[in-house]
Image: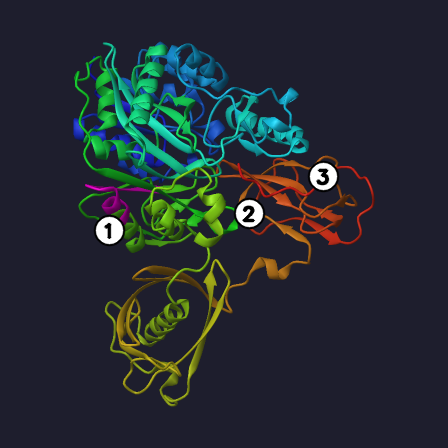
Amino acid sequence: MTITTLLVANRGEIACRIFRTCRDLGITAVAVYSDADADALHVREADLAVRLPGSAPADTYLRGDLVVAAALAAGADAVHPGYGFLSENAGFAAAVQDAGLTWVGPPVKAIELMASKTRAKELMAGAGVPLLAPVDPATAGPDDLPLLLKAASGGGGRGMRIVRELDALPGELLAAAAEAASAFGDGEVFAEPYVERGRHVEVQVMTDAYDTVWALGTRDCSLQRRHQKVIEEAPAPGLEDALRTRLHDAAVAAARAVGYRGAGTVEFLVSAEGRPYFLEMNTRLQVEHPVTEAVFGVDLVALQLRVAEGEPLDPAVPSPSGYAVEARLYAEDPARDWQPQTGALLTLEVPDGPGVRLDTGYTGGDTIGVHYDPMLAKVIAHAPTRTEAVRLLAGALERARIHGPVTNRALLVRSLRHPDFVAARLDTGFYDRHLADLTTPGPGNPATAALAAALAEAVRATITPGPAPAPTRFGAWRNVPSQPQVKRYRSEPDGTEHEIAYRTPRTGTPEPYDAPGVRVLTATPDRVTLEVDGVTRHFALRRDRDRLYVDTAGASYTFTALPRFTDPATQTDPGSLLAPMPGTVVRLAEDLAPGAAVEAGQPLIWLEAMKMEHRILAPASGTLTALHAAPGHQVEVGALLAVVQEGPVPGDHPGATAPVPEETA
């Protein structure tokens, strides 16, 4: 059958990506959207859109019955699940087909066989795919450490824990099971040896109904945070030919073992000694599929549609060319435990050019909410060599203009230029080792950027509002042009304060006061050019209320104008626990109540935001004097959750635990 109208059962970047192929093929694109996504980019780009009432994923994008009804209402003849949400839900795939619609995905049976990682491993063992031996947590001993706990269903790092101490195993099992049940509706957790300094290498497969199986090379996805991928590349560098062949053969065997059809990914852990172990098979399109598309010159979504229509693949596998690297741009703060960020995305501009691709679900002016994953975009670079591709991607990210919530952009640029990454010394512990260095202040001078902001603001103040800018006037400083004026800014998010002195002479162009080596060449409200120690530097500026965004070569800065901005943390009592982000309180420590004794580092409150669970820890040992949080409460950033009064802690008390590290799942 021929697909004419396709509903994408997803949102954001992947929905927009699939719609792009729909336009290329002349297929009518149908979106579904929650109330929180009513004005989202994927809704604006679709030909038709159907509302799913509500905002939470459980009420909208995870309601298979509503999605199927939406497809029928819009006259769709096929459904593409994208990734995440219902993409690997066998029941949803069956419901789509039962409704007479074409399912753009693998057979229901293949999804069922691979849905549970424990069952999948048993099946792969029979197909001769290399595996790690499972470990029974009930009988685990010191020789089994470290262990990796994983959710049997789902992925994305949720329900995953590394256990290095046997005493921590029961608590981590409980936490992993609770998180898995919340994220996937299945609390089953299994354990296997944790491979130190292993690499995450995967093989893209594409199969049809006529026993043609393509192994479209390898991808390295070792750079991860919270067990979620950050930077991916194809082909995986530094693998011996024999290992590549073994990975390809194992991936093909895995696909054939389950009668697979369509696009899928077989994931492996490769030890430091070069031994591969099967992790799982993702029965869907992967987030990182663009690097494979770039290297093999294919459109994987178009191939998915062709296979779903019953067409065969070409017998010959396409030939690869060059290297591709992808970076996931997240609204998050890597220096603060990767906390997701929300709010208005004022600007999102990535320079266009040969070899650079942008996949995004946002544009400037959109709002980043609390309900969904904080990924803003994927930036992909393709070039003849790995060195060129990495350099091209780092440059594109560095020149991007991104204004609004804190992002991981600077981390991505510095990761791509880190000596270990440049030399392809890759493993999943990269950020465990290097995060502190990668999040320290980088090159560039924020004081000079703050000076540019002050000069631009001074020019802005002298311009009379109207249909066209009036000639620059002296404003409030006209009668005393020699007296310096002072502006104060705070760098975000590190909190460093800058005091900038300048004056506006009778020439009308503000100039720095007591700043040797700095000369103002031009100054407008949105662009300042300075000569700093003989080097000309350009600064682009944007203001949004009390925030100023300054972009210059090699660095971007965000400042808050003082004293108008007030930090809620400065207006609370010592020991106050504030919500670090908007979210929902999902649980409290056992028997937590005012008067309870707590220990420093003890997790007291669990907050869920943007598909991640965050623990709020006791800042000191003492007594809980106030508790304002309860399960189910929606809280805003800065909301007071509880107060701990520091002081001596009695002996045994309900809810006390040993200090634990910050949440990493």
- Say if 406 sits above or below 483 in the image: above
> Which amino acid, by three-letter code, is at mark 1?
Pro
Q: Callout 1: helix, strand or loop? A: loop
233 vs 620, nearest the viewer: 233
Where is residue 15 drawn, in percent x and y?
A: 32, 32
Please provide percent x and percent y for residue 147.
56, 29
Q: Amino acid at mark 2?
A: Glu
* Mark 1 / mark 2, whichever is N-terminal: 1
For badge 3, the amino acid type reads Thr
Q: Is residue 382 magenta?
A: yes
Residue that badge 2 annotates: 636
Figure quadrant of residue 403: bottom left
* Residue 33 can be seen in this image: no
Residue 289 sits above or below residue 406 on the image = above
Q: How many marks?
A: 3
Q: Is residue 176 left or right of residue 422?
A: right
Give SS at disc 2. Answer: loop
Q: Which residue is mark 1?
A: 351
Picture disc at residue 213: none
Q: Is residue 157 left or right of residue 449?
A: right
Say which quarter of the image contains residue 255: top left
198 w.r.t. 457: above or below: above
Q: Is residue 201 left or right of residue 639?
A: left
Task: Tell me which residue sits at (33%, 34%) in the image.
Answer: 288
Q: Residues within 10 Å of mark 1 (few under 14, many from 20)?
A: some
Q: Which residue is mark 3?
A: 657
